[in-house]
Amino acid sequence: MTPWTPPASAIFYGALLLTLAFASLCFGGISRLRLLILPATSAPSPTLNLSLPPLLFAITTLALTAWFSPPLLPGVALTIGFLLCTLSGTKPTELWGIFRFRPFPDIRFSLHTMLTLFLPILFFLLLSSGLFLLFGLPLEPQPAMTRFLEARDTKTLLPFLTYALLIAPIWEEVFFRGTLFSWLAHRMPITQAQWLSALAFGAVHMHAPTLIPLTFFGAALAGVYRTKNSLIPSILLHSLFNANTCILILLARPPLP
């Protein structure tokens, strides 16, 4: 069997990404991470004032949908988000900061933050994978990722990319940051609200090897929403992160046997 080596384009992109990520950490990245991940107890945050039963019903509905009918998840999550905001008497556009969009500053901030998060997330991914190997647990990619690795035609790639770059960032930010985190922030300290909502975000992907890095990413996304008081930067960051992951996979994936 001929040994496979990554193409030059993958090596170049990976080297460029690592260089930019390291530079981003060195030049303001550490303080940015601290601000996003470890907020002060008195840090202001969007909040959703709602009783417990509606939220428990919403989480149960979302969990059942994720388990039995994943394709319906985006529509169900968006509907739940709007309904809970309506029940609380809050306008979704105000809570989620939809109209506080500043294109160039938001894109620049999201790109810089994506580069800042890349190395920490890579570290947690390698740590999690190492733990699975250490304890002899199966280390397999998500089924959707397997299909993406095997896809070679536009008909298969386009739906996956549309979901990863557009649909998933919108519905996941609306529910996990705009709804769940906002509700938790009304009832507990900000740090606990961030990490609890982030844990739910990691768990909904139903892939144990990536639970740790996705939880860290979810906490950072909540920090972006908290500091910017708008879901737009967190949606952009989420989309850029997914786009970067897809580029790496497309460049580095081995040929089909």
Image (cartoon, grey):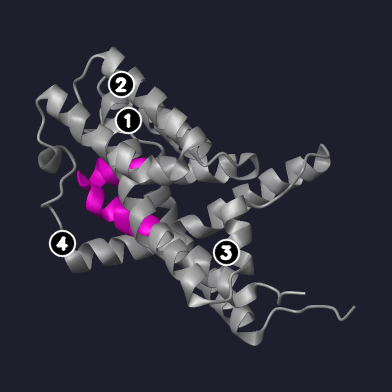
Secondary structure, mark 3, is: helix
- Disc 4 + disc 1, Cβ < 8 Å: no
Secondary structure, mark 2, is: helix
* The disc label shown at residue 102, or none: 4
- Residue 131: tell me if it is visible: yes
Q: Distance between the residues labelled 1 and 3?
A: 30 Å
Q: How far apart are marks 3 and 4 (CA)?
A: 33 Å
Q: Which of marks 2 and 1 is nearer the N terminus?
A: 2
Q: Residues within 10 Å of mark 3 (few under 14, many from 20)?
A: some
Image: magenta residue range: 222-239
The quadrant of the rendering that contains the C terminus is bottom right
Q: In this view, does 35 lie to the left or right of 214?
A: left
Q: Which of 91 and 145 is in front in this view?
A: 145
Secondary structure, mark 4, is: loop
Q: Distance between the residues labelled 3 and 2?
A: 34 Å
Name the residue beneath numbered marker 2.
55
Name the residue beneath numbered marker 1.
180
Q: Which of marks 4 and 1 is nearer the N terminus?
A: 4
Q: Earlier in the sequence, mark 3 or mark 2?
A: 2
Q: Which of 38 and 70 is in front in this view?
A: 70
Residue 238 is inside the magenta segment? yes
Name the residue beneath numbered marker 3.
148
Query: Where is residue 250 drawn, in percent x and y?
Result: 57, 73
The secondary structure that most of the magenta stretch takes on is helix
Query: Where is residue 59 drawn, in percent x and y?
Result: 38, 25
